[in-house]
Image (cartoon, rainbow, N blue to C red):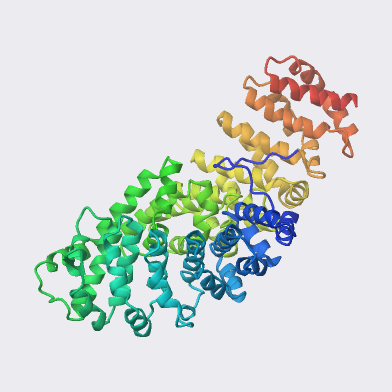
């Protein structure tokens, strides 16, 4: 069998979603309400972090049925709540998912759900609405179509901290100009939201602050009103100034600075007011330094701890802020943002969820197009993680021209860029389709591949061998590649096995030979090369077990008796003395080596 090089993060590969998707949808139509509820709960668990499953369920018609169950008077409150949760999860997938939900008229259904007396159901509907309205594909006007919606949302603000957080977030995303500002203002947004600035919940305080920043933007009426609003005996401008203090999170400092700036521009606060002028000037001047320091801190915190990475990513709007940092004018901020994302990309779970939800690969690919080497090194290292087999970002990255970009990096004078370029290609080739492998070989060129195999940097050599090993997997692929590049590959293998290389390099090279030996026609390139056969024989008797095992893989694939021509191959190898060595190795104290030798001998006896 062919050996694939394991990818850096060890994780079971995400299973393909096939018939199970239909099963989830079918259960929604069961006559037993309890079975329907359990089916929805199981669907909820299945779609978490799985965009393929989400897309399949949408195509199979899950959304109309979920909306029907959500609106049925006979449905239990628990079922309605679970339906809203699943719909919210579907909305957290791709933009196409959100478009599909909008086409099914999800917003009116969820808004109707807000009339329920049950708080948990209301919160689930609001959470889903929040996700949909914060998507760039959702028209903000949908919030204002029914004149009863805004006053009802204002009334719901007092229900819980979750209703406060979600409603404020909806308002701040859907307030896109003077008309929207006027509607919200006329329905008491300022009075209803002001007291939330002193909430015990940071998320509520932050979303309320963002509401004020969008309400006050280029709006003198709102700005003049804010100046005189009292919250627990303090005027709003004083609260905003307190939020500028150094002990407050950077996001809060910058957003409160926005509010004060807009109020100054509207003439509500004098521009020379001593309480804010120095602070505003200082923060705006050092915004880059603040962001850079924050990104560096998060990168360090998340480097080796999965729980901390999870907490960082779950911080409100954190991913948005980091992604925005990739396009900062300051090189130092861009570098810090890339380092932060690289640190977070070590999480398998986040690669599958947050990194996909925020399409991190898009700005990253832009960074890789034109950046100084110090940024390129970190960005390309992060790209290696995004190209792991289970990463949902892998496919769109491939479609965006990543092969050519990475092949270009392998020609860099910087060894770190050559390593990352070839490493990313190695990950890309892991269990890849024949077309992707052909694209890699065509773009890289045989000449460049063999230049990398003679690179002075050991890491470059090892990753290039890893690439070859992943390219030469799956029999049809092995035979196809060896039919066009066989002569050069065998030449390179010979040179490495004869050269002064360490154990790991020679083990990788022998594993490549083992993969070639697994081909249907490719194995003849080994059988007709006496020099290579003698080298395999030599390494079977080597003092290092790793090399003996790798050589044994080659022999096992060559003598396998179920394949055409096996008798002739067995005879030739017996004449070379291979069977005698196998008998000797079958007595080895190493259990793996002993088992492999016995298995190979059985092929002769079968």
Quadrant in which the C terminus is drawn: top right
Along the viewing direction, whichever of 384 and 310 lies nearer the viewer: 310
The part of the image, by quadrant, that contains residue 514 is: top right
Along the viewing direction, whichever of 129 and 472 lies nearer the viewer: 129
Whether residue 504 is visible to the viewer of this picture, yes or no, is yes
Residue 414 image position (x, y, % from top left): 43, 50
**Does 597 sit above or below residue 187?**
above
Asked whether, in this view, residue 225 is left or right of residue 522, the answer is: left
Residue 447 image position (x, y, % from top left): 61, 52
Which residue is pictured at 47% across the width and 71% down the height? 133
Whether residue 455 is visible to the viewer of this picture, yes or no, is no
**Does 114 sit above or below residue 220?**
above
Residue 419 image position (x, y, % from top left): 50, 46
Which residue is pictured at 63% across the width and 40% down the height? 5
Residue projecting furthest to the bottom = 179
Which residue is pictured at 54% across the width and 47% down the height? 423
Along the viewing direction, whichever of 340 and 574 lies nearer the viewer: 340
**Does 594 sit above or below residue 225?**
above
Along the viewing direction, whichever of 535 and 567 lies nearer the viewer: 567
Asked whether, in this view, residue 495 is left or right of residue 573, the answer is: left
How many tags in the picture? Answer: 0
Which residue is pictured at 87% across the width and 38% down the height? 563
Residue 540 image position (x, y, % from top left): 71, 24
The part of the image, by quadrant, that contains residue 522 is: top right
Asked whether, in this view, residue 124 is left or right of residue 578, the answer is: left
Quadrant in which the N terminus is drawn: top right
């Amino acid at each position: 069998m062919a050996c694939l090089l394991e990818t850096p993060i060890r994780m079971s590969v995400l299973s393909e979603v096939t018939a199970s998707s239909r099963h989830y949808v079918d259960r929604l139509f069961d006559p037993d309400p309890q079975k329907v509820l359990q089916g929805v709960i199981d669907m909820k668990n299945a779609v978490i972090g799985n965009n393929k499953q989400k897309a399949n369920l949408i195509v199979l018609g899950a959304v109309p049925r979920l909306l029907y169950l959500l609106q049925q008077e006979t449905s239990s409150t628990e079922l309605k709540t679970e339906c809203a949760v699943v719909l919210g999860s579907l909305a957290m997938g791709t933009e196409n998912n959100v478009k599909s939900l909008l086409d099914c008229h999800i917003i009116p259904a969820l808004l109707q759900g807000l009339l329920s007396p049950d708080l948990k159901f209301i919160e689930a509907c609001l959470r889903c609405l929040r996700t949909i309205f914060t998507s760039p594909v959702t028209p903000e006007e949908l919030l204002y179509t029914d004149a009863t919606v805004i006053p009802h949302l204002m009334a719901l603000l007092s229900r819980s901290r979750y209703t406060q957080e979600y409603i404020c977030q909806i308002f701040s995303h859907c307030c896109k100009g003077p008309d929207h500002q006027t509607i919200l203002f006329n329905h008491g947004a300022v009075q209803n939201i002001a007291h939330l600035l002193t909430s015990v919940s940071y998320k509520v305080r932050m979303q309320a602050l963002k509401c004020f920043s969008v309400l006050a933007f280029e709006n003198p009426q709102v700005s003049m009103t804010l100046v005189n609003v009292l919250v627990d005996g303090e005027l709003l401008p004083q609260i905003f100034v307190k939020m500028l203090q150094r002990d407050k999170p950077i996001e809060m400092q910058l957003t409160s600075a926005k509010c004060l700036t807009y109020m100054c521009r509207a003439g509500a606060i004098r521009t020379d007011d001593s309480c804010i002028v120095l602070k505003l000037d200082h923060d705006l001047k050092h915004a880059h330094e603040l962001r850079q320091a924050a990104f560096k801190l998060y990168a360090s915190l998340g480097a080796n701890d999965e729980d901390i990475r999870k907490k960082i990513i779950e911080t409100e709007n954190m991913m948005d802020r980091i992604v925005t940092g990739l396009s900062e004018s300051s090189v130092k901020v861009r570098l810090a943002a890339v380092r932060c994302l690289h640190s977070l990309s070590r999480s398998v779970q986040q690669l599958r969820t947050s990194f996909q939800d925020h399409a991190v690969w898009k700005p990253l690919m832009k960074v890789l197009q034109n950046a100084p080497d110090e940024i390129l090194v970190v960005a390309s290292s992060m790209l290696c993680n995004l190209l792991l087999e289970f990463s949902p970002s892998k496919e769109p990255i491939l479609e965006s021209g990543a092969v050519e970009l990475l092949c270009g990096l392998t020609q860099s004078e910087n060894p770190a860029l050559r390593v990352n370029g070839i490493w990313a290609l190695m990950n890309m080739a892991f269990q890849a389709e024949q077309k992707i492998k052909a694209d890699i070989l065509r773009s890289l060129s045989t000449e460049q591949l063999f230049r990398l195999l003679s690179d002075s940097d050991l890491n470059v050599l090892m990753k290039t061998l890893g690439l070859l090993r992943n390219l030469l997997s799956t029999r049809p692929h092995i035979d196809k590649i060896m039919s066009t590049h066989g002569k050069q590959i065998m030449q390179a293998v010979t040179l490495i096995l004869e050269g002064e290389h360490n154990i790991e390099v020679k083990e990788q090279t022998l594993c490549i030979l083992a993969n070639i030996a697994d081909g249907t026609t490719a194995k003849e390139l080994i059988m007709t090369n006496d020099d290579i056969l003698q080298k395999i024989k030599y390494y079977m008797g080597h003092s290092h077990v790793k090399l003996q095992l790798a050589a044994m893989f080659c022999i096992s694939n060559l003598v396998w008796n179920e394949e055409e021509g096996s008798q002739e191959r067995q005879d030739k190898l017996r004449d070379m003395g291979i069977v005698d060595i196998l008998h000797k190795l079958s007595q080895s104290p190493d259990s793996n080596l002993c088992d492999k030798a016995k298995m190979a001998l059985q092929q002769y006896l079968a």
